Image (tube, grey):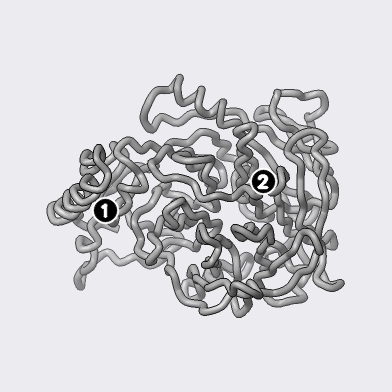
């Protein structure tokens, strides 16, 4: 669509914000200077489009980019986004394969090796996985990313680092390969990065978090009759894998989607949804779409929230008192998209005794696509992978801005302070920003 961006009044707001900030934090007065890749979009500039306005007809195929900036860039809707970005923020692609949706979900940063693990699209477009084929778990080295960025120089120039692919049991027995080789050409490869050996019990990985007591936590959607599961995977040799749950009192889950550890509890909370069935790789569902709590020690599992169309991403505030769950009912697999269904993030209070989710309320409704994977930063700003990139809301639910990619971002993870790694299906983006990370590794 086309709209005129009014900058004058918004610049005053930016200046006011920067002045107030500089009084409390000396040395940040230059915050009025937008990062070179940032554009300002004053909400007043498109609040009224008029009788002949170019209104969007689809939240999935039509994006709000009134400045016609070229992705990737930062779209600033509120002065608070500058606190997230800082004056020298950059974003660029660091790995890409246009023929393979290798970077879909389950991003986990491992501090000890400075790697990010992630999974390919399970059952979706360009994923190369279906009822007969498992999806792919891979990793990138952020040390290699840093070296490539240093060589390329400051700015948005893309780099393309190698990706270590973990060959599942349906390909070559769990060994690793790198770009430029087929999945069945894994024998004998040793590129110096972590090479996991995942067993048949890990099928269609879709969610991940941690490390948790040093292990990756993977939730898996299952495939055909093979059950969805929660797995603990050692990212270091001997890469042992332990399945800690694969049923609810004897019934298989639908297809597990996302997982987080509630701060201060060491309990796992995960979403279960029917996307495996809707993407033709799981049987018809046996239970409602729900959020579960799992005690990894006792293996006790129970429902803590229900009433969703399709519960998807999950996240917690820093203190663990507030839970966020995205409902992605607007996208329905083989049933297609329906914009009248939810594309909504809900907030809940977490009961201090039972840990049930209560006092449900709307936190945000997504303007483009749906909110998939979610993370919070150290200031409790919420980040979500959406249809045009990553959207960022403050704790009150105000949309601050976007990491605008012009394509879907399914998930993201902070790799420590000031580094954000974004899964964008056929590419991985790396943003260097001012925001600090929320803790995901426990204990």
Camera sees residue 274? no
Q: Is residue 193 left or right of residue 314?
A: right
Q: How many marks?
A: 2
Q: Distance from label 2 to label 1 (Cα)?
A: 34 Å
Asked whether, in this view, residue 137 is left or right of residue 62, the answer is right
Residue in the image at 52% along x and 70% along y: 330
Numbered badge on residue 69: none
Residues packed near mark 1 inside 10 Å, few (<14), some (14 to 19) or many (20 plus): many
Q: Nearer the viewer, residue 195 or 237?
A: 237
Mark 2 and mark 1 residues within 8 Å of each other at the beta carbon: no
Disc 1 element: loop
Residue 422 x/y as whole percent: 51, 45
Which residue is painted at 52% across and 73% down in the image?
348
Q: Nearer the viewer, residue 47 or 440?
A: 440
Whole-percent x, y for residue 268 in the image: 68, 60
Please tell me whether residue 5 is drawn above or below residue 187 in the rendered image.
Answer: below
Q: Residue at x 51, y 57 (%)?
A: 318
At 19% across and 56% down in the image, what residue appears?
A: 4
Pinpoint residue 5: horizontal percent, then vertical percent: 20, 54
Which comes before the other along the chain, label 2 or label 1?
Answer: 1
* Camera-side mark, 2 or 1: 2
Say what secondary structure mark 2 lies in.
strand
Q: Which mark is residue 211?
A: 2
Image quarter for residue 98?
top right
Res. 371 visible in picture: yes
Image quadrant in which the N terminus is located: bottom left
- Give the image location of residue 188, x and y in percent: 81, 23
Residue 79 bears which disc, if any? 1
Q: Residues within 10 Å of mark 2 (few under 14, many from 20)?
A: many
- Quadrant for residue 168, please give it: top right
């Amino acid at each position: 669509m086309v709209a005129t961006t009014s900058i004058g009044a918004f610049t005053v707001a930016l200046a006011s914000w920067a002045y107030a900030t500089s009084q409390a934090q000396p040395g940040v007065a230059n915050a009025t200077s937008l990062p070179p890749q940032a554009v300002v979009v004053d909400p007043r500039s498109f609040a009224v489009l008029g009788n002949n306005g170019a209104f969007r007809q689809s939240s999935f195929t039509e994006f709000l980019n009134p400045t016609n900036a070229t992705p990737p860039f930062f779209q600033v809707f509120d002065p608070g986004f500058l606190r997230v970005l800082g004056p020298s923020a950059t974003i660029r692609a660091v790995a890409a394969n246009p023929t393979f949706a290798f970077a879909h979900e389950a991003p986990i940063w491992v501090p000890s090796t400075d790697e990010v693990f992630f999974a390919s699209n399970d059952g979706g477009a360009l994923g190369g996985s279906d009822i007969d084929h498992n999806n792919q778990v891979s990793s990138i080295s952020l040390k290699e990313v840093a070296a490539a960025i240093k060589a390329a120089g400051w700015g948005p120039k893309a780099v393309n680092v190698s990706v270590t692919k973990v060959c599942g049991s349906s390909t070559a027995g769990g060994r690793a390969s790198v770009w430029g080789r087929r999945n069945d050409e894994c024998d004998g490869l040793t590129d110096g990065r972590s090479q996991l050996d995942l067993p048949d019990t890990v099928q269609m990985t879709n969610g991940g978090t941690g490390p948790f007591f040093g292990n990756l936590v993977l939730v898996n959607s299952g495939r055909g009759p093979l059950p969805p599961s929660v797995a603990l995977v050692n990212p270091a040799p001997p890469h042992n894998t332990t399945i800690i749950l694969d049923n609810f009192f004897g019934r298989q889950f639908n297809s597990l989607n996302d997982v987080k550890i509630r701060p201060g509890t060491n309990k796992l909370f995960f979403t279960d949804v029917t996307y495996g069935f809707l993407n033709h790789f799981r049987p018809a569902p046996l239970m409602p779409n729900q959020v579960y709590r799992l005690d990894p020690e006792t293996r006790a599992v129970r429902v803590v929230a229900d009433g969703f169309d399709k519960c998807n991403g999950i996240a917690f505030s820093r203190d663990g008192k507030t839970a966020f769950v995205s409902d992605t009912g607007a996208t329905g697999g083989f049933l297609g998209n329906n914009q009248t269904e939810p594309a909504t993030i809900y907030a809940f209070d977490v009961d201090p005794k039972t840990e049930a989710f209560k006092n449900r309320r709307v936190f945000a409704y997504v303007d483009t696509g749906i909110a998939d994977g979610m993370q919070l930063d150290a200031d409790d700003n919420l980040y979500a992978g959406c249809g045009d990139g990553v959207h960022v809301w403050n704790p009150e639910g105000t949309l601050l801005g976007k990491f605008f990619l012009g394509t879907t971002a399914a998930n993201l993870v902070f790799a420590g302070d000031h580094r954000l790694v974004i899964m964008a299906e056929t590419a991985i983006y790396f943003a260097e920003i001012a925001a600090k990370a929320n803790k995901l590794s426990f204990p």
